[in-house]
Image: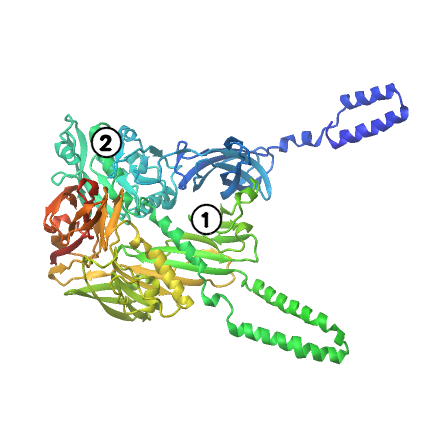
Amino acid sequence: MCGLENWLKVRYLSVFYYRMRGWPAMTMVILLTCLFPVPSDAARAAPEDKPVQIEAELGWQGQGVPGRYVPAVVRLKNTTGRDISGVVEAVNYFKYSHPVPPGGTPSSGKTSFYPAAAFGERISLPAGGTKKVVLWFPMNSPGGRTDFVFRAGDRELARVSKGIPSNITYLRGPRPGGVGVLGQIPPVLEKVRVVMPDGVVRYMKAVQLTGELFPRRGEELNAFTTILVTGEGAARLSAEQRRALARWVKNGGTLVISGGLAVDEALAALPGGTINVNVGEIKQQSRWQAAAAWLGREAPEPVAAAVVSLSGAGEPWGPQDNPLGMRYPLGNGAVTVLGFDPALAPWRAGALGESLWQLFLATPETEKWGYDPNYSEYRLNRLVNMTNNLPAEAFPGWRPVGLFLLVFMAVAGPGVYWLLRRTRRPEYTWVAVPVLAVLFAAAVYLYMVQTGGNVLVNAVQVVDNRDGEEPSGYTAVGFFAPTRPDFTAVLEDPDRPVQVESRGGRPPELMGEDAEPPYTLIKGSDLTVRFSDVSQWNMRGIAFENENIPETVKGLKASVEVRGNKVLGKVVNKTGLHLDHVAFFLGSNYKVLGNLAPGEDATAELPVSVPQYNAKGSYGPEFPNGWQVFMYPDGPPAVKPGMPSPRPERRLNVAEQRRAGLMDNWMEEFRRGPVETGWPLTVLAWSESPVLDLGLKELYRPPHYLTMFALSPEIKLAAGPFTVPAGLVMPEVTDSQIRGMFGHNNLRGMEGGSVTFAFRPSLPERVKINQVTLRFDYYPMQGTPRRGMSPATKPGPVPDGVLEIYHPGRGTWQPLTGSGTFNLPGDYATTDGEVKVRVTGGYPEKGTGFFFLPPTVAYGGEKE
């Protein structure tokens, strides 16, 4: 009796009863209402109450990593007799705990949820049909929730809430990372416990990956640091998924390819030509003494297994006489092809298999970027902030503004006065002038809206080719549209993973569950990024890796020639672009070559020096700040001992500020880590010309561009014997497990833990390294922590347990003791010249503390 018809009927019969004024009428009302009920609105709409049914499964077997991409399988069913088109979304909600009211207990505090972001896809549901959709989006943080919603226009047709899956791994501090397996998971992976260099045991979980839950973009695999591919698993991948796997490796992943009888099928997991590996004959091997000794384990009982011989451009991995496989560096990651199948005995279980996986899970490459191998995401997060720096040309100059005001004054002054005098209506002056001002302002506003001037688009890009391979492109685009509370950016590629920056917002206590998320990504024929009104007065930004790199970009070449204790650098511009502020950097020195037009080249000379103990200096090298490069193009100014750097002589203009900000932002990695070592040999250049295609749609005005080029010059060597002096190849900190640090002037000390340095020269082809000279200045500590700690006046011999060097052929760390200068054979360097050195700290309270300077490496060899 809650429907409108029932209410009207009861109302009518009640009036009838009032007029009849008797119990017979009352009885008739009750009988008629109960025996002949009219269906209510709710009853009639019952079939349409749930026109779409929705179910969702989040994560890989219910697992994921907070902040990393995770899949969600969403199943939808159309229960109506008509087709429905709409959007299925995954909405991440953050949990907010309200302050406890006065006099209340902690348990009495109110909690609420508010939307953080939404990720969806446009779909069409046929009448009575079902559809399965796999959404990829960053997993929510613990304590939050994810709602899966289907909307048709503004109408919500279905919703289901899911909690947060269990963590594969934690992303804080040293950790082995998530492990994915394409194929059957070896039992040993379920038992591996990795002891990191800091002594902490890290646990991990292995996740079985399938073709259905394997993404088409490498960025969406960032929940894993290691992936094992078997022949069975590789067959499940499409061509797009194979390219995604290769991209994930280049971003810093560690890929292990199973060998044995199915090695050819497993190698097919990567696109053809990604690595150069030759598969030879397959033989049976039953004795594993060499492998066990290399892994530091006792030899197992003889077990026969198929082993394939491998060769190619990679490096042998394992014992020098009987390698276990081949290793291929690829971008920031590496591919290791095993000769055997790790899912079979004697590797599938036991101590031998555990030691094998401990090497893959605790490799320094996975810690290369400060505990985060997905360094491209870190880069994009920093790059998108640079879109706030708009160029001066984005705003009207003083000339058009002055002309506009001049015309307005002419019309509002003499013009209005003449018109009103002519019409003999001078009393309307107080009305005419304000109306004219409103009309002028409205005309300018409408003109800017019609021409797209109400949306300022700022594109900041980086073309980074410091690894000497294919250049990598990074793009960030900012949209400033204060006249649009809700703004939508449209990208042509619907599958492009983007990072969104939505600044501004409201306090959580003012946001409800029904509020629109700050941003929503929707896939379809294109990719739309919808920003809500919370960021209306701020720059709305998106950032992504840009693979659309034109061939002309590769025309920027740089090289150096060694001339005694100096290098002569040369830059050639064959990009077809106008480059400005082209500069060489090395250590704490730099030199600006100036601007280069297409086809031009320029040279610069830089000194080569090694770190020296400065009793009056401060810790670390004096890094050139961005403003110094534009203020002092011939190099940093001299600084008196114990005095700060001189103040700038002038203010940088807007163009210089944008370039300096981008340089400091992008190249900040050289100042990361506990031991600063100086700039590696680098060339930077800028351009305001369009370089990389943005892939944006619906732009009314051309964006403002700023692109920075970064590359490592190749060391030119003449045929015959050569020497690369110490100080030319700067070390990079690739691994740091430090518990405490201390310093004295420009010396540094560690309290326990270790730091790994890598020397990576850009050498030409057909080079053989015969000798590696390592220099490490070790200063014993004098005094105690309570009475003061100071270094010895001169470096002393290196004791045992302080210095180690990695031997790539043996795959082991070799200790070094004695004099601070070590002349080593060339096999301590890889084929491309990489040398790894590890320094382990002491303990001052135990009398083993010391100070040191960053190590240096010199090369000697021969070029064909």
Depth order, front residue of 690/198: 198
Q: Is residue 210 above or below residue 643?
A: above
Depth order, front residue of 272/856: 856
Tell me residue 32's x, y (percent): 80, 22
Q: Label 2 belongs to which residue?
A: 354
Q: Which of marks 1 and 2 is in front?
A: 2
Instruction: Please state which amino acid type lies under the numbered disc 1.
Output: Pro
Q: What element carries label 2?
A: helix
Q: Distance between the residues labelled 1 and 2?
A: 42 Å
Q: Label 1 belongs to which residue?
A: 494
Residue 762 lies left or right of residue 185; in this view the side is: left
Depth order, front residue of 388/694: 388
User: Residue 841, located in which quarter of the rendered image?
Assistant: top left
| In contact (CB < 8 Å): disc 1 and disc 2 | no
Tell me residue 104's x, y (percent): 54, 33
Tell me residue 716's x, y (percent): 18, 62
Q: What element carries label 1?
A: loop
Residue 192 lies left or right of residue 413; in this view the side is: left
User: Sequence order check: which comes first, mark 1 or mark 2?
Assistant: 2
